[in-house]
């Protein structure tokens, strides 16, 4: 922050509140921005409540028109929490790549789900072979957006997006590994269906990609935590973070579902087949909902990376010398 302290030690009253003598120093240090010393608004910033131009007012004073704390307007105009974070190296590229990644993931999952959904709509019975009736090459096409997602991760990763890059690097690796494994292994399921492999082989093929999806999602969650902090809207939307957690839970349920289906197919517990299928279907549904949320959130994060709020130093200045009126 470029704003330097006009020493707090000297008990200067509000030097810059000429229009309103009632602008008494506030006593609660936590919410009034006391850590910034003495600063005044140096740009035309409209009061958040009434639109009064706050230029020249101290950050500790109140709006002469409506009495709202100037500091409250300032914290809305800037994003102090975001400006305290490490710098993003290529914010626009990271924002675009994040949105591309989310869109790719959604497209890939939708393509993979289409044949199975089609067969469900046609009212076929709920068995693991139901999808074999639908055009499996559609599901196979899911590999294309999934691989494109890897390009997006590469764009985020080079150079590493965040200044202290170590932790972010680890999560980017998890994301790449998970995406690569998921993209390649998820092609096994439509292939085994096309070549009419036996039911156990098909279930194994569908199971194979799931652990990679889980690893990738954990990496994605941490990456979103790091990058999403720059967006106030994302920080405040609890649903954004929870939707990734929900997708992780859905993947775990999916793996359990495949496990139960396998047990049923091997013959040890045939009664588990229906339960396994229900888990697989509901987790797939949750994944699609979660990915829709992810696309929306990636757009929100992208918007604030492309056009970040101004820094506090850009809209405030030093306190004028004592005695100089405005
Ligand atoms: Zn006002």
Image (cartoon, helix red, strand yellow):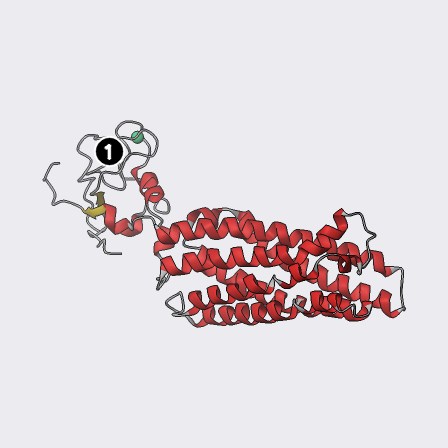
Ligand 1: quadrant of the figure: top left
Residue bearing the label numbered 1: 53
Image side of residue 117 versus residue 10, left or right: right
Q: Residue furthest top?
A: 65
Residue displayed at 60% across by 52% down: 290
Neighbour class for label 1 at 10 Å: few (<14), some, many (≥20)?
some
Mark 1 residue CB less than 8 A from any atom of ligand 1 = no
Expressed as whole percent of the image width and height from the top left, the position of residue 192 reads: 74, 69
Above or below for 254 versus 188 = above
Image side of residue 266 versus residue 256, left or right: right
Expressed as whole percent of the image width and height from the top left, the position of residue 251 reads: 67, 61
Question: Residue 48: which quarter of the image?
Answer: top left
Query: 251 or 226, which is in the foreground?
Result: 251
Please identify the quadrant where the N terminus is shown. Answer: bottom left
**Is residue 37 shown to the viewer in this render?**
no
Residue displayed at 19% across by 30% down: 19
Query: 148 or 166, which is in the foreground?
Result: 148
Expressed as whole percent of the image width and height from the top left, the position of residue 157 reads: 43, 68
Expressed as whole percent of the image width and height from the top left, the position of residue 87 reads: 35, 62
**Is residue 315 shown to the viewer in this render?**
yes
Query: 27 or 189, which is in the foreground?
Result: 189
Residue displayed at 42% across by 57% down: 96
At numbered mark 1, what does the secondary structure look like: helix, strand or loop?
loop
């Amino acid at each position: 922050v470029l704003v330097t302290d006009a020493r707090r030690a000297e008990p200067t009253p509000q030097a810059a509140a000429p229009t309103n003598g009632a602008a008494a120093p506030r006593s609660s240090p936590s919410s009034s921005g006391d850590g910034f010393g003495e600063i005044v608004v140096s740009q035309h910033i409209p009061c958040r409540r009434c639109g009064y131009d706050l230029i020249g007012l101290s950050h500790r004073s109140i709006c002469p028109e409506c009495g709202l704390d100037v500091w409250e307007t300032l914290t809305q105009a800037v994003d102090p929490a975001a400006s305290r974070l490490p710098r993003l190296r290529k914010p626009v590229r990271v924002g675009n790549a994040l949105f591309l990644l989310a869109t790719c993931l959604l497209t890939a999952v939708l393509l993979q789900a289409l044949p199975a959904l089609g067969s469900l709509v046609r009212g076929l019975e709920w068995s693991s072979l139901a999808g074999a009736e639908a055009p499996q090459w559609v599901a196979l096409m899911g590999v294309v957006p999934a691989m494109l997602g890897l390009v997006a991760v590469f764009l985020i990763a080079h150079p590493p997006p965040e200044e202290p890059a170590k932790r972010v690097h680890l999560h980017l690796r998890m994301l790449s590994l998970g995406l690569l494994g998921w993209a390649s292994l998820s092609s096994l399921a439509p292939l085994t269906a096309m070549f009419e492999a036996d039911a156990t082989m098909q279930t194994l093929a569908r199971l194979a990609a799931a652990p990679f999806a889980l690893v990738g999602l954990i990496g994605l969650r941490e990456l979103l935590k790091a990058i999403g902090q720059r967006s106030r809207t994302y920080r405040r939307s609890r649903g954004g973070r929870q939707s990734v957690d929900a997708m992780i839970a859905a993947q775990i349920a999916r793996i359990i579902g495949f496990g139960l289906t396998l047990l049923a197919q091997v013959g040890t517990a045939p009664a588990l087949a229906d339960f396994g299928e229900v888990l697989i279907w509901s987790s797939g549904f949750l994944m699609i909902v979660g990915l829709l949320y992810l696309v929306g959130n990636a757009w929100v994060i992208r918007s604030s990376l492309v056009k970040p709020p101004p820094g506090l130093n850009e809209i405030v200045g030093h306190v004028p010398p004592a005695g100089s009126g405005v």
